[in-house]
Image (cartoon, rainbow, N blue to C red):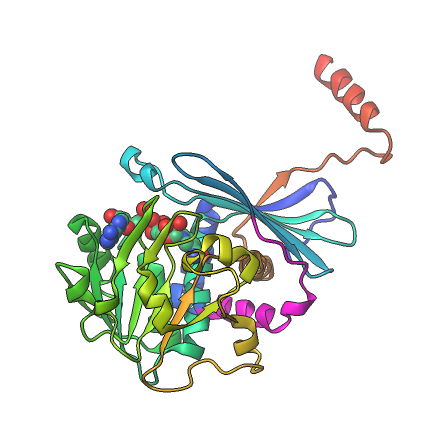
Amino acid sequence: MPATDQLNIVPFVSVENMMDLVLSTGTEIFLRELADYVEEDFLRWESFDKTARVASHSDDGVIELMPTSNGTLYSFKYVNGHPKNTRSGRQTVTAFGVLSNVDSGYPLLLSEMTILTALRTAATSAVVAKHLAPKGARTMAVIGNGAQSEFQALAFKSLLGIDRLRLYDIDPTATERCRRNLAELGLTIEACRSTEEAVEGADIITTVTADKQNATILTDNMIGSGVHINAVGGDCPGKTELHRDILLRSSIFVEYPPQTRVEGEIQQLPQDYPVTEIWRVISGEQVGRQSADQITLFDSVGFATEDFSALRYVHDKLRGSECFEELDLLADPDEPRDLFGMLLRRQALTAA
Ligand SMILES: NC(=O)c1ccc[n+]([C@@H]2O[C@H](COP(=O)([O-])OP(=O)(O)OC[C@H]3O[C@@H](n4cnc5c(N)ncnc54)[C@H](O)[C@@H]3O)[C@@H](O)[C@H]2O)c1
């Protein structure tokens, strides 16, 4: 924790700071350490104050607030999702977040979370896949080669030993960029011309496309027995990636059912359709993969506890690091109740 006895100061991790923190750690080590925090918080799932995120939808996208607390720490993330944004040079997803001390209510950290979201989403997918993917999985198809894709690939390499990637995107320049970015990182990469071609021989299929509609990225005939599907891109009402028939053949694992039933692939199924909460598998209470021919599906939408884990990890990482700035965020009058007096003293000072 960055030490400061000035009560007005909150450590701020800018995008530049985050990049330095990730690079000085090493991206794969960062993903593995972050995955440990994500796993640790899934293991104490019941201690969290949980609520489905608060979403404000528009024709073009969504803006969401994602709060949670474990009674000691509190966090929230602001995040948007606007698939049309890349056409105007903007990101589909941007985010920032706050970690606070429940005891005083004072923020401990304000951080960029666009990069951190990509890292935490990838780390979470890999933590889940450790419990669900077929044994000895080495090949992953990645459908959708945008901002999240390289992070997903590296997390699966680092945590599961995936060393072969099969990429597909409707935009070949996205696939080429992804291939180039990962070229020197120890993966054998094949750029494919269709989703059908990409999923051929894959043990794990990651879908991470962005489209504001019920898309059908994967159809039932593409899915052979025994694969693990890591479905990341369907995360809003009316925004899904898988044909319903795939869901009916799969064992479905979710983060927080009240949120996933509204936002995930399972919005296509009845509200009481049986799904397994992933924390129960991680804690050993329920079994993940039960047989070699079972199709497992992680219906990922992203849950607040994963952002909590990410902020908690970054906060711990800042100890002894210089990857933050000191932000004068909290008013701190000499006498706590003299907030107005502070304003008057400022006026006198600036008038002098
Ligand atoms: N589950 C989570 O926790 C989580 C977290 C972050 C992002 N997401 C979601 O992941 C998705 C991807 O995010 P991103 O930041 O990488 O977006 P992005 O816009 O950077 O990339 C999306 C890519 O998908 C491609 N695409 C669109 N339709 C396709 C299709 N039919 N077939 C193949 N490719 C297609 C686009 O060409 C683009 O390259 C978004 O939908 C986002 O909301 C989910």
Q: Residue furthest top?
A: 351
Question: Residue 111 appears at what percent x and percent y?
Answer: 54, 47
Is the stretch drawn in magenta largely helix, strand or loop?
helix
Residue drawn at 84 percent across, 34 percent down: 334
Quarter holding the C terminus?
Answer: top right
Quarter holding the N terminus?
Answer: bottom right
Residue drawn at 64 percent across, 71 percent down: 44
Q: Is residue 351 above or below residue 193?
A: above
Residue drawn at 63 percent across, 68 percent down: 45
Is residue 38 in view?
yes
Closer to us: 237 or 10: 237
Q: Is residue 280 left or right of residue 264?
A: right
Q: Per the image, is 33 magenta?
A: yes
The quadrant where residue 216 appears: bottom left
Q: Is residue 325 left or right of residue 140?
A: right
Question: Residue 268 appears at what percent x and percent y?
Answer: 41, 57
Q: Is residue 128 above or below residue 193?
A: below
Is residue 190 in view?
no
Q: Residue furthest left?
A: 193
Q: Read off the magenta span.
A: 32-53
Q: Per the image, is 168 magenta?
A: no
Closer to us: 338 or 59: 59
Residue drawn at 28 percent across, 79 percent down: 225
